[in-house]
């Protein structure tokens, strides 16, 4: 039988409306149940503001729910974050090290990965220039290349299957799709049903912060389409 | 399988055996230390790149203060007396470190908001990075100060050897105050302004520009209960008067500061679940 990696029971999370310890809260996630097994490829669908991004942040461990229980097997979990902690005035190389450290790599591992980052990003001489001189596509290239150096047990992806210009778009999509092969555990939030259908074997559908349906991809997507929710435009929101 | 309701303790390998968890804990601590050191270095380099004069700005501010006060007290009011410039210089350099460390830390956790929304990191990392960057700047200025003192005829005495100890206690005090401020400002933004006001008051209450020995004796006893006044006095004793510092006072202050710092780090760990959920 499949071994569970993360189990959520009746999990909810509230953002604060004001910068105070007390006061109004906004429940981005009301009540979600989820069982993620090792090796699962889970797609998450739902309308804008349904709580998909918040769910990923709980799965990553960065956010602690305000109700419900979370059980997790040990092992690193990564929420794919491009340009996390980047400092504009530093070189691509320095930012790669800094971002890698923040995301959980130790110094020695990063140093070892640097040639791979440099090659994958394909920035040429710009790798040793300040990120402030980069185009936004180049920043994404660098950020993506760093993020791909992690080897988490569970990879969480929020909408970003491909970044950068056309050439890099193909390259980054291929690199991510590799993570969907084999024993990796992946959770993908996406508005592209075709992508989810192609890559995921299970789907979680959340609506207004609640689990609407969970199960095999075909069944859930069919119900999702019947509810007239498919094809909703993408977008992400970080808080209230 | 055991339910984990409190993810605050949800470090990697939290559910493995105690020995492995211990090792993982040490590895995690080492990584956090790596993050602090590298991020501090990166911020310093970024700051140097951002301005035309870079490093020189760190020296200009205390230098400017010094010139102004020398002009006002020694030249215009003629109240300085012998060694006044050195006296103010030591006080100002020391104060600059305390003031900048504390005031720069206030917003550090909210500035790292995007990072802590994506990865589980102890919030204490961010104020400590700021304390470290300001400490590096201080060391640069201190080197110049020692040179200037030597050149201006202050004798280099054995008491200078105790300077690192005085500075370590001072560092612990700065880190403790900064950590508490950083921990609470996300919830009470007004504290940042309150801290600025308190710092301004402390600048005038800590004997940077006047000699505490001029105060009545019973006032002096209270005066040196202020840790800033006490620390600045120790700096002057060691550097200018060739005296050893107040060992007992330093020991009490150092231990107290470390306890307060530990409490602040603990508080941040408890509040950690709230920081990523606050509005920007």
Image: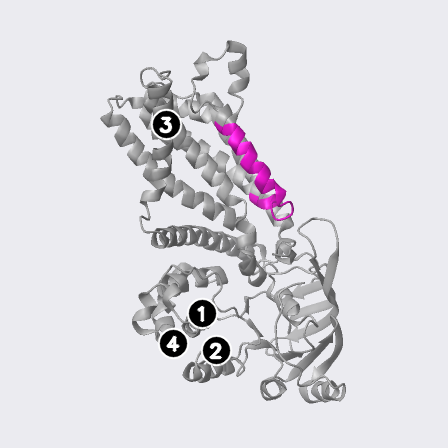
Q: What is the C-alpha distance between the residues marked 4 and 3? A: 52 Å
Q: Residue lying furthest top in this view?
A: B217
Residue denoted by label 4: A120
- As for residue B185 lying within the magenta part, the answer is yes
Q: Nearer the viewer, mark 4 or mark 2?
A: 2
Q: Residues within 10 Å of mark 4 (few under 14, many from 20)?
A: some
Residue B251 seen in the figure: no
Residue denoted by label 1: A143
Q: What is the C-alpha distance between the residues marked 1 and 3? A: 45 Å
Camera-side residue of A118 and A225: A225
Q: What is the C-alpha distance between the residues marked 1 and 4? A: 11 Å
Are the two marked residues, 2 and 3, in contact with CB atoms closer than 8 angstroms? no
Sequence-first tag of 2 and 1? 1
Q: Which mark is residue A97?
A: none
Residue at mark 3: chain: B
Residue at mark 2: chain: A
- As for residue A216 lying within the magenta part, the answer is no
Q: Nearer the viewer, mark 4 or mark 3?
A: 3
Report whether A173 appears left or right of B180. Answer: left
Q: Nearer the viewer, mark 1 or mark 3?
A: 3
Q: What is the C-alpha distance between the residues marked 2 and 3? A: 54 Å
For the N terminus of chain B, give its image quadrant: bottom right
Q: Main secondary structure of the magenta part?
A: helix
Residue denoted by label 2: A163
Q: Residue at x 43, y 53 (%)?
A: B39
**First to last magenta residue range:** B182-203
Residue denoted by label 3: B90
Report whether B129 appears left or right of B266. Answer: left
Judge whether A86 appears above or below B26 on screen. below
Q: Please provide percent x and percent y for residue A50.
A: 70, 72
């Amino acid at each position: 039988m499949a071994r569970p990696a993360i189990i959520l029971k009746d999990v909810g999370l509230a953002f604060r409306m004001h910068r105070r310890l007390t006061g109004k809260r906004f429940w981005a996630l009301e009540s979600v149940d989820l069982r993620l097994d090792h090796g699962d490829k889970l797609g998450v669908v739902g309308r804008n503001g349904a709580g998909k991004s918040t769910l990923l942040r709980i799965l990553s461990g960065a956010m602690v729910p305000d109700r419900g229980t979370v059980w997790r097997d040990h092992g690193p979990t990564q929420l794919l974050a491009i340009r996390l902690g980047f400092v504009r005035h530093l070189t691509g190389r320095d930012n790669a090290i800094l971002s890698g450290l923040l995301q959980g790599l130790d110094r020695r591992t990063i140093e070892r990965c640097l040639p791979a980052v440099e090659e994958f990003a394909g920035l040429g001489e710009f790798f040793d220039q300040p990120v402030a001189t980069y185009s936004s596509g180049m920043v994404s290239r660098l950020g993506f290349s760093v993020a791909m150096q992690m080897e988490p047990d569970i990879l969480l992806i929020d909408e970003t299957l491909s970044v950068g210009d056309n050439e890099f778009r193909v390259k980054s999509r291929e690199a991510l799709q590799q993570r969907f092969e084999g024993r990796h555990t992946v959770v993908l939030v996406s508005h592209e049903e075709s992508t989810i259908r192609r890559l995921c074997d299970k789907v979680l559908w959340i609506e207004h912060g609640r689990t609407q349906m969970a199960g095999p991809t075909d069944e859930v997507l069919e119900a999702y389409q019947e509810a007239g929710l498919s094809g909703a435009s993408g977008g992400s929101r970080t808080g209230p | 399988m055991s339910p984990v309701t409190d993810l605050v303790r949800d470090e990697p390998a939290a559910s493995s055996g105690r020995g492995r968890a211990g090792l993982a804990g040490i590895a995690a601590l080492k990584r956090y230390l790596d993050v602090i050191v590298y991020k501090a270095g990166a911020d310093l380099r970024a700051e140097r790149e951002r301005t035309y004069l870079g490093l020189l700005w760190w020296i200009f501010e205390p230098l400017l203060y010094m010139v102004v006060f020398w002009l006002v007290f020694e030249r215009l009011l003629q109240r300085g007396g012998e060694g006044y410039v050195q006296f103010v210089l030591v006080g100002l350099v020391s104060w600059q470190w305390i003031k900048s460390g504390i005031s720069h830390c206030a917003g550090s956790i909210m500035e790292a908001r995007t990072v802590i929304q994506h990865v589980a990191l102890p919030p204490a990392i961010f104020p400590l990075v700021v304390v470290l960057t300001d400490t590096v700047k201080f060391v640069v200025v201190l080197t110049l100060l020692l040179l200037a003192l030597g050149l201006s005829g202050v004798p280099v005495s054995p008491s200078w050897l105790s300077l690192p100890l005085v500075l370590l206690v001072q560092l612990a005090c700065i880190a403790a105050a900064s950590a508490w401020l950083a921990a609470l400002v996300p919830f009470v933004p007004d504290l940042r302004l309150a801290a600025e006001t308190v710092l301004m008051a402390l600048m005038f209450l800590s004997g940077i520009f006047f000699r505490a020995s001029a105060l009545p004796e019973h006032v002096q006893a209270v005066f040196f209960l202020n840790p800033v006044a006490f620390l600045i006095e120790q700096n002057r004793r060691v550097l200018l008067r060739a005296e050893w510092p107040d060992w007992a006072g330093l020991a009490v202050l150092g231990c107290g500061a470390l306890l307060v710092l530990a409490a602040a780090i603990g508080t941040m760990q408890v509040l950690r679940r709230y920081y990523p959920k606050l509005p920007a």
